[in-house]
Amino acid sequence: GQNIDQPTEMTATEGAIVQINCTYQTSGFNGLFWYQQHAGEAPTFLSYNVLDGLEEKGRFSSFLSRSKGYSYLLLKELQMKDSASYLCAVRDRSDSWGKLQFGAGTQVVVTP
Amino acid sequence: ETGVTQTPRHLVMGMTNKKSLKCEQHLGHNAMYWYKQSAKKPLELMFVYSLEERVENNSVPSRFSPECPNSSHLFLHLHTLQPEDSALYLCASSPGGGGTDAQLFFGSGTQLSVL
């Protein structure tokens, strides 16, 4: 079966760094996505990894190790607006459309 | 704005009611999806349409009935729902293809409460 695990909640202070881990066990692998979802809003795309290594995009970075079934999202210089749920999602097939398997999300709380 | 619009934002219905959720995407995408999001649980894929043809139906009860009249519009028709169907229903679209073209663009969802 499919299994994507990430911590339920993390708390950090403004200006700090937080690392959200995601481990996955899926029948196939064709890419891993991270999404950010503020309460009452649509999930929005943050990053995509398909090869091993680190992808950096401003204050956010995402890392992938396919052999370990592991990814993390690194949030640097935390701001209050970064308080949100962060969703890890794996594409396990190579269809022409994007069916994604999601984790339950990690609620990040940024405190002053 | 993600380019995917859902209406209504909130819906309260009784178990005997019939209602419909509407989704419209302005991105020219080929695939559209319905996901269910319950508190503390992963998003559950319900239906997928690719080029207006249903390609996935994940054992969803028949009280949920999707309709995709064209590549820009998607509906979810609801009838005789149960209280456990209360959740956030998210519509999404994607360009169709591999790599980052598998990225989903989500609407803000319809928060459904079944009494």
Image: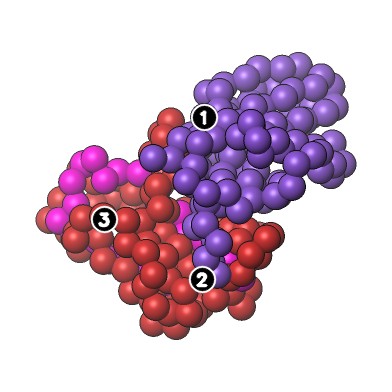
Marks 2 and 3, how far apart at CA: 19 Å
Q: Which amino acid does label 3 sit on?
A: Val
Task: Name chain A's colour.
Answer: purple
The reply to whether callout 1 and callout 3 are in contact (CB within 8 Å) is no
Label 3 marks a residue whose chain is B
Residue annotated with mark 3? B60
The image quadrant that residue B25 belongs to is bottom right
Q: In this view, does B31 lie to the left or right of B57?
A: right
Instruction: Return the mark for residue B31.
Output: 2
Q: Which chain is red?
A: B
Residue B9 seen from this side: no
Residue A65 badge: none
For mark 1, what is the residue?
A: A5
Q: Who is closer to the viewer here, B92 or B108?
A: B92
Q: What element carries label 2?
A: strand
Q: Which residue is drawn at 55% across and 76% down?
A: B30
